[in-house]
Image: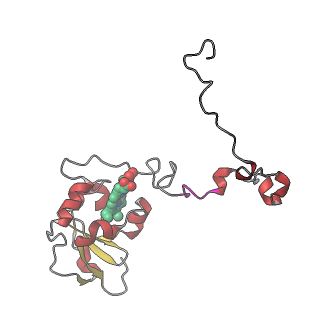
């Protein structure tokens, strides 16, 4: 018993150090020259995460610092509510089947209660999505009845339109395009 201690440690098994074979000692001289020195570039520059311009970067072009903030969505209009609506099987495109539309036809759908938008070559009916859009209705309306591809990707290149608006597909831009 060691004086002044609460428990007797003299009988407890002692932990042997690992055998030399299990614990190899790396001698610097054995290492290739390249591994022996810290690279001249700082760690932040050596790794590609977070990528420049990615949403993880606080100062990304699409971050809260560089553009409009997200709006507060009304109760019942969360992304989860949208996912439920999409799953419900309701016709969100407003058309029976997708087909090609001319630019003049697309232009007619430029109101809040009748809003089409082109992203890439696809036309989506975003009318029902208005209240669900985290960026707000007014942001969505900037591309109402127009080709919103540039605006869309400037605002959030990481958002996949098909994932969210799959069942809102109205059709495809007919002809060579040109808004
Ligand atoms: C082209 C017109 C559009 C504009 C100008 C626009 C703009 C914006 C803005 C300013 C925000 C807020 C950004 C922030 O989080 O700080 C936002 C968020 C968002 N928008 Fe849009 N948007 C557009 C179209 C769309 C469409 C068609 C969809 C659906 C596919 C969509 C889906 C989203 C999503 C999911 C967010 C949240 C992004 C996040 O949390 O990272 N937007 N949008």
Q: Quadrant of residue 31?
A: bottom right
* Residue at screen point 47% across, 50% down: 66
Q: Quadrant of ligand 1?
A: bottom left
Is residue 48 inside the magenta stretch? yes
Task: Please say if 67 is above or below 116.
Answer: above
The furthest residue to the top: 4
Q: Quadrant of residue 29?
A: bottom right
The furthest residue to the front: 11
Task: Please say if 58 is above or below 164.
Answer: above
Q: Between residue 49 and residue 5, name the one nearer to us.
A: 5
The C terminus, quarter of image: bottom left
Q: Is residue 62 visible?
A: yes
Q: Is residue 143 visible?
A: no
* Residue at screen point 37% across, 48% down: 69
| Percent coordinates x, y for residue 32 in the rendering | 81, 60
Please report the bounds of the magenta region as a residue range: 47-53
The N terminus, quarter of image: top right
């Amino acid at each position: 018993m060691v004086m002044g201690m609460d428990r007797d440690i003299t009988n407890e098994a002692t932990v042997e150090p690992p055998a030399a074979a299990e614990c190899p000692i790396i001698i610097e001289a054995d290492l290739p020259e390249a591994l022996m020195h810290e690279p001249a570039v700082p760690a932040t520059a050596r790794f590609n995460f977070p990528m420049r311009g990615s949403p993880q970067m606080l100062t990304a072009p699409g971050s809260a610092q560089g553009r409009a903030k997200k709006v507060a969505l009304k109760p019942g209009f969360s992304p989860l509510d949208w996912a439920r609506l999409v799953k419900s099987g309701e016709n969100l495109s407003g058309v029976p089947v997708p087909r090609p539309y001319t630019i003049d036809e697309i232009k007619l759908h430029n109101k809040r209660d009748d809003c089409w938008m082109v992203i890439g070559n696809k036309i989506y009916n975003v009318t029902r999505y208005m209240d669900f859009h985290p960026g707000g209705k007014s942001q969505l309306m900037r591309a109402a009845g127009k080709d919103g591809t540039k605006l869309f990707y400037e605002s959030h290149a990481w958002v996949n339109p098909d994932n969210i608006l799959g069942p809102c597909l109205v059709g495809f831009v007919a002809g060579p395009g040109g808004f």
